Image: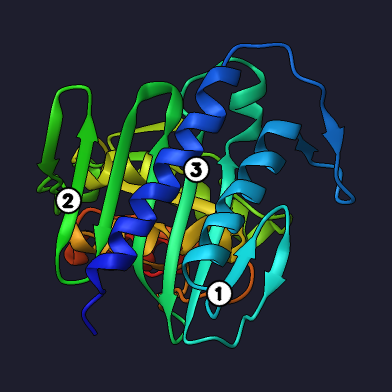
């Protein structure tokens, strides 16, 4: 399925809007609210999602939308947009620059377009099925390509939420961390853009929702990487999953074997 150019243009417009809304609030005093699950939320991210939804409603009223702050509508539509206005709210609140807006388009449940927009750094990754992944920053635009690293002991590993609440996932994370050259923590969705551009080789995050991971799928895959859940199953637009991304299919197979405890 070829993604219509008009949809790509709309996605970039959404990313521009997220940047315009969020960049002025970087390192400003913000009132923090708590959602029902106890996680923090701010008015700028709620306002950003409202703005993104309004743009989609006006352009394509028959499209579905799933957002972290505004819930789901028309989820059975042929095309569904998934929005996470701020991935990395804790980074946002503590003045760090790596928070991002995640924007995805799903066609019949499959992610075909994804954007990681990093407003404070004026940086963006755009992945479109069969068109590659483009990385844009203050130095211009270029195609992103993962780093050639097919050996775990030479790999650079990044994670923000390494495990779930169970002992099995903790053991799996420790096996992986002990198998790589170096491991770093933090970074949220920004890590997956950095993987697409060859700066790290493996990213793992537990308990991600669909609006957290849908945008990452085309970005990683179109840059030459592989991305799945921790069992190797493809990621669509459903459910909470542990997400694993690697710089190549060969490396990904090794990562999955380590997570599964294979010798």
Q: Which residue is at a point 58% across and 51% down the rendered structure image?
A: 84
Q: Is residue 186 visible in this depiction of the protein? A: no
| Place of residue 211 in the rendered image (x, y in percent of width and height, measured from the top left) | 56, 60
The vertical placement of 232 against 66, above or below, is below
Dot label at residue 129: none
As measured in the structure, the alpha-carbon distance from the residue carrying label 3 to the one carrying label 2 is: 32 Å
The label shown at residue 101 is 3
Q: Which residue is mark 2?
A: 151
Question: Residues at badges 1 and 2 in contact (C-beta under 8 Å)?
Answer: no
In the rendered view, how is the structure colored?
A: rainbow
Of callouts 3 and 2, which one flags the residue occurring earlier in the amino acid sequence?
3
Quarter residue 227 falls in: bottom left
Kindly state the secondary structure of the residue where label 1 is placed: loop
Q: Position of residue 127 (x, y in %)?
A: 26, 57
User: Dot 1, crowdedness within 10 Å: few (<14), some or many (≥20)?
Assistant: few
Q: Can residue 173 be seen by looking at this rendering? A: yes
* Mark 3 or mark 2, whichever is nearer to me: 3
- Say whether residue 234 is left or right of residue 5: right
Q: Is residue 154 above or below residue 95?
A: below
Contact between labelled residues 1 and 3, with CB atoms less than 8 Å apart: no
| Point 44% across, 62% down: residue | 104
Q: What residue is rendered at 55% in x and 31% in y?
A: 21
Location of the C terminus (image quadrant): bottom left
| Cα–Cα gap, marks 1 and 2 | 47 Å
- Pointer 1 residue: 61
x, y percentage for residue 94? Answer: 64, 17
18 shown above or below 14: above
């Amino acid at each position: 399925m070829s993604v219509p150019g008009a949809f790509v243009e709309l996605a970039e417009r959404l990313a521009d809007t997220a940047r315009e809304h969020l960049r002025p609030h970087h390192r400003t005093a913000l009132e923090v609210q708590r959602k029902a699950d106890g996680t923090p939320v701010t008015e700028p991210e709620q306002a950003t999602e409202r703005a993104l939804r309004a743009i989609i409603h006006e352009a394509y009223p028959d499209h579905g939308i799933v957002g972290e702050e505004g819930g789901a509508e028309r989820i059975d539509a042929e095309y569904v947009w998934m929005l996470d206005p701020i991935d990395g709210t804790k980074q946002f609140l503590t003045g760090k620059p790596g928070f991002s807006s995640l924007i995805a388009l799903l066609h019949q449940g499959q992610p075909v377009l994804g954007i990681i927009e990093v407003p404070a750094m004026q940086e963006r990754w755009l992945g479109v099925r069969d068109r590659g992944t483009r990385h844009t920053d203050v130095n211009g635009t270029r195609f992103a390509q993962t780093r050639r690293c097919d050996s775990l002991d030479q790999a650079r590993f990044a994670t923000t939420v390494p495990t779930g609440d169970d002992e099995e996932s903790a053991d799996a994370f420790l096996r992986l961390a002990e198998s790589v050259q170096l491991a770093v923590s933090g970074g949220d969705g920004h890590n997956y853009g950095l993987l697409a551009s060859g700066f790290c080789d493996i990213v793992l995050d537990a308990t991600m929702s669909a609006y957290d991971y849908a945008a990452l799928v085309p970005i990683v895959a179109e840059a030459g990487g592989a991305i799945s859940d921790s069992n190797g199953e493809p990621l669509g637009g459903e459910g909470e999953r542990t997400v694993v991304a690697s710089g190549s299919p060969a490396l990904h197979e090794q990562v999955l074997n380590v997570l599964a405890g294979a010798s």
